[in-house]
Image (tube, grey):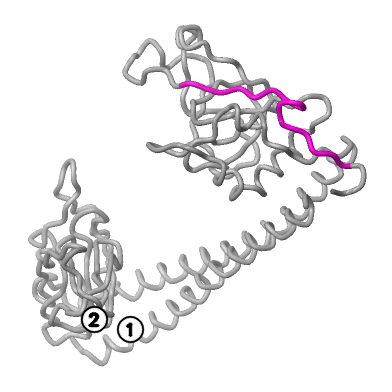
Amino acid sequence: MKEGWEYKKIKEVGTVIGGSTPNTSNKEYWGGDNCWISPAELDGSHYLYDSKKKITDKAVKEKNLKLLPVGTVILSSRAPIGKVTINKVPTYCNQGFKCVVCGKDLYNEFLYWWFWGHTNYLNSIGKGATFVEISKTVVENIEIPVPPLSEQQRIVSYLDSAFAKIDAVAKNAEDSLNEAKALFQSALTKMMEPKDGWKKKKLGEVLNLRRGHDLTHSQMEDGDIVVAGSNGPIGFHNVATPISPCITIGRSGSVGSVNMYDKCWAHNTTLYIDDFKGNNPKYLYYILTSLNLAKLNSGSAVPTLNRNFIHPISIPFVKDVSKQKAIVATLDSLKSKVDQLQDNLSRTLTECTALKQSILRQTFE
């Protein structure tokens, strides 16, 4: 233990308050003036300024809800355990929270950062068969380090500054990726605009789509062939759909999502091109990518996409395969930059998370 620090149970330095959820089917409970939050609203923001749902005075009274004053540390105590925020407005909360009103010896932002850095520990103390939860009693008896208040405030200031710099690095990587995506999309649109020598064609004249084939997880055999679902890989198999490359369109679920693989088993949640009709496959892939196929959704409760709605779509088309290849080369070059920046963002986010955890360990251990 660091000099001047001592461990205390949360109930010794704060008051733990649980929440409740009014009956969602009772209209008299909803649409009032009282803020009420659920774990789904915790999006990683440090402070919660308002809530999407409001409850009535009737709900407050009948559910015996306790108002959380401004500055309460709000912790999700059901899966996903460990989401945490601090409220900027008085609010009531869902039963999936355990909330701590800090006493005079505990700085609320210090507790926020302690919770933030101990997600694995918080999950390890959750109990339950139907769903894992940390009870009010368990939260009350969690032991936390309690340095002098001035030291808590100094630590919070340091963490706020350090994490802001780390977040700025991640934000720069994200902004670079978004700029590259916008540039690629603009180029894709321009490359598909009609030019001299191009003709109007129906998609069914330049490619043929076929519905994918059913394959349950239990039927998948060990192999390295991607099973292509509506929005990407959903497994692997040892047999491929007999055409390569494999270009799929989300048929149900992620309707209109276009993906391309060297080989794949096209699942029945997709449509796939089974005849390129002499055209460059990648050129056809980019054509499909440039179209808003999701708007052709013909389903109701379950979104679906019918190939009979796609084949009649009229597009500007260049038949010369050498020109198709030139278009593909230009778009591939831009797409490779997007892919590089996507990899860079993923790597940066991983490194930033690891750095934050390292800083928190050094701070609290």
Residue at image position (14%, 70%) is 203
Q: Which residues are magenta?
A: 5-20
Q: Is residue 313 above or below residue 320?
A: above
**265 lies left or right of 120:** left
Please state the horizontal and vertical placement of residue 76, each as a whole percent of the image: 54, 36
Is residue 134 visible in this depiction of the protein? Answer: yes
Nearer-the-camera pick, 292 or 272: 272
Please state the horizontal and vertical placement of residue 7, each as a whole percent of the image: 80, 38
Nearer-the-camera pick, 278 or 251: 251
Residue at image position (61%, 47%) is 121
How far apart, in angstroms, are the residues tagged by discs 1 and 2?
Answer: 23 Å
Q: Residues within 10 Å of mark 1 (few under 14, many from 20)?
A: some
Q: Nearer the viewer, mark 1 or mark 2?
A: 2
Please state the horizontal and vertical placement of residue 136, each as a whole percent of the image: 58, 27
Is residue 290 visible in this depiction of the protein? Answer: no
Q: Residues within 10 Å of mark 2 (few under 14, many from 20)?
A: many
Residue at image position (63%, 66%) is 351
Whichever of callouts 1 and 2 sits on the residue coming sooner in the sequence is: 2
Residue at image position (27%, 83%) is 262
The kind of residue tagged 2 is Lys
The disc at residue 191 is none
- The residue at which mark 1 appears reads as 327
* Secondary element type, mark 2: loop
- The residue at which mark 2 appears reads as 263
The kind of residue tagged 1 is Ile
Q: Is residue 11 magenta?
A: yes
Asked which quadrant contains residue 314, the reply is bottom left
Q: Is residue 96 magenta?
A: no
Please state the horizontal and vertical placement of residue 12, each as a whole percent of the image: 76, 26
